[in-house]
Image (cartoon, grey):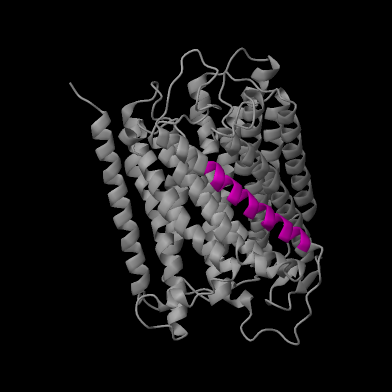
Amino acid sequence: MSNFRTCPETGFKIDLDAEKLIKWNAVTGVVFLLVGGFFGLLVALTRWPSVHLLPADLFYLALTAHGVDILLVWIIFFEMALLYFCSSVLLQCRVATPKIGWLSYWLMLGGAALGNVVVLMGESSVMFTSYVPLKADPLFYLALILFAVGALIVCFIFFGTLVIAKREKTYEGSIPLVTFGAMVAAIIAVYTIASGAVILIPTLLWSLGFIPYVDSLLYKVIWWGMGHSSQQINVSAQVACWYAGAAVLFGARPISEKVCRTAFLMYILFLQLASAHHLLVEPGLGAEYKIFNTSYAFYLAVFGSMVHGLTVPGAIELAQRRKGYTKGLFEWLRKCPWGHPAFSGVFLSIVIFGFLGGISGVVLGTEQLNLIMHNTIYVPGHFHATVAGGTTLAFIGISYWLVPTLWQRELAMPGLAKFVPYLFGIGISGIALFQMGAGTLGVSRRHWDMTFADSALTYDYPAAAHLLMALNGISAVIASFAGAIFCLQMVLTIIGKKKAAPAELPAAPQAEAIQGHGHGGGLAVPGTFVLALVFLTSFVLYYFVNWKYLSEIWILS
């Protein structure tokens, strides 16, 4: 039988086996965030024309390592910690098969470490997409497979823990909304990993010489079932963090739980289809396939995110107005704890993900507009708005609450923590905006030297593009500095001073807020609706501007 402890600060009943798995997965993720961020800084400084740090071979090595460590390793390790937390801790039950949980951890760590070693050896600089006929060392594909198998095992442990909680009746009614969001992430993860296995196993055999070739179009179609859908795991997990942050900091409950759960279900049904927007210039796919997947079906997934973007701030506004912050449209927002890194991280994640990631994603997902941005640096700009500005910032924010709570430690350098989400948010927003601006001017996505100094045929980008890439480099320095401070804080917190135990449990334990059910009690959220109208106006204007730009460069005779 598992042992439990009751957290004196929050009221959580925590299985000690689950607690260890959460800690090790979260810490490992943070380590790879630091490593991947370092490679990303090298990439940005190389794309900065006046610095141009790395030669071509090292640039593509760093670009490959950055993509794998950030888009896969850091985020999925942290998501595994969230799966354990959202199942065992929130449902107050023992974790299923903890020994197998440790097996999955070592598989993931072994795959991540092996992947980094192989990339650093210099024979696997195939970038994150690893498109065939580019061929990496067989160990590169093996590393990804090992990592994916470990993550898949954790998903099944999560489902097993839900079964245990249901059977042992450790909760009443439906599972909490945060756990529901984690469940959606786990379901999408199973699909994602299955897609990866379908294409990476044949690619491994091809790299070993057992099969003659892998069709390039087939590879892209199936690979993006993994490459894009892995980011939908992130979206579901980050939204779960939004709801968790609102519940913990404000005791907030959503305007309507049924609507929120329906929005999560829309992710399962429609988000994976959006992977087709990576394939809009492929000649082997029909126009019907492209248009359906990137318009009608894609917009349903976007609608789900827009619902969450309304209900999370709405829940906070309802909670704040109940506390008496009712003056005007935005007193509730002004009185939020902007100095608390958990709040600022979560709220900035909502804003950056919605305004920068969401709007640019819909533009990229429109077949006609995609043609003027595909394979430009606009695409990484969108990625940074979603994965870094959305998911990573949400995880950073929730870590400032979760790590001191689980480790029962005082947060190291709390005064400095106030500034980290803002610095990181400014840096990532700059990267996203400047890369999207440079991409609109045509700057290529993957070329290591935008001056083409060593090319037989040169091409001069507009002077504005050089300025934008310089500003991108400065933004990367700011984001890397903030990320390094965050990693240092987490390490110092873990090894630092233990919290003094409170004399008694809080009057309203955080466990009750995050595990609770029900709705927030009304639709009296005028401030949130005004913010939503600002978002929709920005959306329409930016969409129109891009169609106008397309009409000017698409000359018909």
Where the N terminus falls, by quadrant? Answer: bottom right
Does the magenta segment cover residue 233? no
Image coordinates for residue 552, horizontal then vertical, percent:
24, 32
Q: Give the residue furthest to the left.
A: 557
Quadrant of residue 367 within the rendered picture: top left
Q: Is residue 183 visible?
A: no
Residue at the spot 73% in from the left edge and 27% down from the top edge: 139
Q: Is residue 458 above or below residue 174?
A: above
Between 378 and 316, the one lying in front of the other is 378
Q: Is residue 295 above or below residue 172?
A: above
Residue at the spot 56% in from the left edge and 31% down from the top edge: 129
Q: Is residue 219 above or below residue 153?
A: above
Image coordinates for residue 317, horizontal then vertical, percent:
43, 75
Side of 335 where 34 appears, left or right: right
Where the C terminus falls, by quadrant? Answer: top left
- The magenta region covers 472-492
Quadrant of residue 159 within the rendered picture: bottom right
Side of 34 where 478 appears, left or right: left
Residue at the spot 39% in from the left edge and 75% down from the top edge: 330
Does the magenta segment cover residue 475? yes
Residue at the spot 30% in from the left edge and 45% down from the top edge: 543
Between 289 and 381, the one lying in front of the other is 381
Question: What secondary structure prevails in the magenta region?
Answer: helix
Image coordinates for residue 476, horizontal then vertical, percent:
57, 45
Quadrant of residue 90 within the rendered picture: bottom right
Image coordinates for residue 315, horizontal then vertical, percent:
45, 72
